[in-house]
């Protein structure tokens, strides 16, 4: 069975920009100039097109969003990160293909850790392809060629074409990743100084849905509670130590006096939430 050919694209920068302390944009989804095709050619003499580098700056970071300008049709676009040598273009990471909406900038969420010097580009089903020009290391204009299949992740495709004047309509948001945990510090990582966690928000106090009356003659008590999905619970009776418990806790042999029951939630990141508390008296 034959596979549909796909357009493979990648771009190179004029100069690698310095590492940023805040989110920055790589590439240019809606470049200035005439855009007749997805492998876009600017109007003659339009030097403004050369101002948006497509190379990851020194220090790297995490790509948290792709933006792609579909200038006609509804292609399925697979944004990619590439490593390049003087003769080979190697896709090393990608966001799964997404069907584009025509004549608009499409936004695609992502979480791809990248290193300085890597390139952004894309692949999609269609006719023809664009690749990086290696004739001039400072030339980030594109040229078109014949149909070719996409290289799989970890594979490679040769490229050795003369400089042209095409530019790709894709860009990416690159966020810093101070703790190198693979989550963008601005929108994905609440704990940018802790590589072991990216969620620092504690869960809310559980809701105690079942509990004894304020006064009861029973030496038994049953509690039922609910909380954040995925969280576990820890329970405490009076001044005893907290112990792991399920969503139901049964107590017996309670003494005739006032009692206090506490429960809190622990989310998958290990954050401990505040206690929910209920008090009652066993009267005998």
Image (cartoon, grey):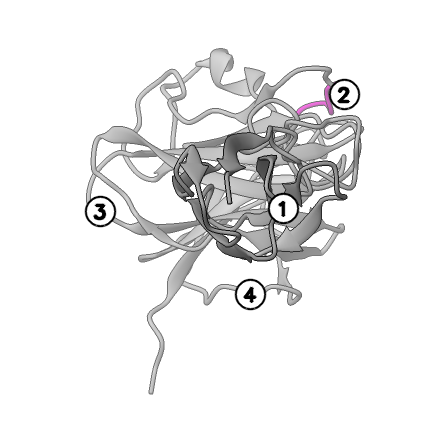
Which residue is pictured at 59% across the width and 42% down the height? 256
Q: Which residue is mark 4?
A: 151
Q: For the N terminus, which image quadrant?
A: bottom left
**In-front residue for pair 128/253:** 253
Q: Is residue 268 left or right of residue 178?
A: left
Which residue is pictured at 51% across the width and 45% down the height? 284
| Residue 139 image-quadrant placement | top right
Check contact, mark 3 vs mark 2: CB within 8 A: no
Q: Secondary structure at mark 4?
A: loop
Q: Is residue 134 visible?
A: no
Check contact, mark 4 vs mark 3: CB within 8 A: no
Disc on the earlier residue, 4 or 3: 3
**Span shown in magenta:** 14-18
**In-front residue for pair 23/103:** 23
Q: Which residue is mark 2?
A: 19
Residue 209 position within the rendered picture, expressed as x and y whole percent measured from the top left: 37, 42
| Disc 4 to disc 1, C-alpha distance | 72 Å
Q: Secondary structure at mark 3?
A: loop
Disc on the earlier residue, 2 or 1: 2
Instruction: Give the foreground label among 4 and 1.
Output: 1
Q: Which mark is residue 255?
A: 1
Q: Residues within 10 Å of mark 2 (few under 14, many from 20)?
A: some
Q: Secondary structure at mark 2?
A: loop
Residue 251 position within the rendered picture, expressed as x and y whole percent measured from the top left: 56, 55
- Residue positioned most to the bottom: 1
Q: Which residue is mark 3?
A: 74
Q: Residues within 10 Å of mark 1 (few under 14, many from 20)?
A: some
């Amino acid at each position: 069975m034959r596979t549909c050919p796909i357009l493979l694209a990648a771009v190179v920068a004029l100069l690698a920009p310095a590492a940023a302390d805040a989110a920055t944009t790589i590439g240019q989804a809606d470049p200035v100039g005439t855009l007749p095709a997805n492998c876009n050619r600017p109007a003659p003499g339009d030097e403004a097109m050369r101002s948006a580098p497509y190379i990851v700056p020194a220090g790297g970071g995490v790509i948290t969003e792709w933006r792609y300008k579909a200038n006609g049709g509804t292609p399925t676009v697979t944004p990619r990160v590439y490593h390049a040598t003087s003769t080979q273009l190697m896709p090393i990471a990608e966001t799964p293909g997404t069907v584009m909406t025509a004549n608009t900038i499409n936004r695609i969420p992502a979480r791809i850790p990248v290193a300085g010097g890597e390139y952004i580009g894309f692949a999609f089903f269609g006719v023809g392809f664009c690749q990086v020009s290696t004739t001039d290391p400072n030339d980030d204009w594109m040229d078109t060629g014949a149909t070719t299949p996409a290289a799989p992740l970890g594979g490679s495709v040769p490229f050795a074409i003369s400089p042209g004047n095409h530019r790709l309509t894709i860009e990416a948001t690159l966020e810093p990743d101070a703790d190198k945990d693979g989550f963008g510090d601005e929108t994905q990582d609440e704990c940018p100084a802790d590589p072991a966690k990216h969620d620092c928000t504690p869960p809310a106090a559980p809701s105690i849905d079942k509990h004894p009356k304020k006064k009861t003659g029973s030496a038994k008590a049953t509690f039922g509670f609910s909380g954040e999905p995925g969280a576990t619970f820890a329970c405490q009776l009076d001044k005893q130590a907290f112990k792991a418990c399920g969503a139901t806790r049964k107590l017996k042999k309670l003494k005739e006096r006032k009692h206090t029951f506490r429960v809190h939630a622990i989310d998958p990141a290990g954050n401990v939430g505040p206690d929910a508390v209920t008090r009652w008296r066993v009267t005998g």
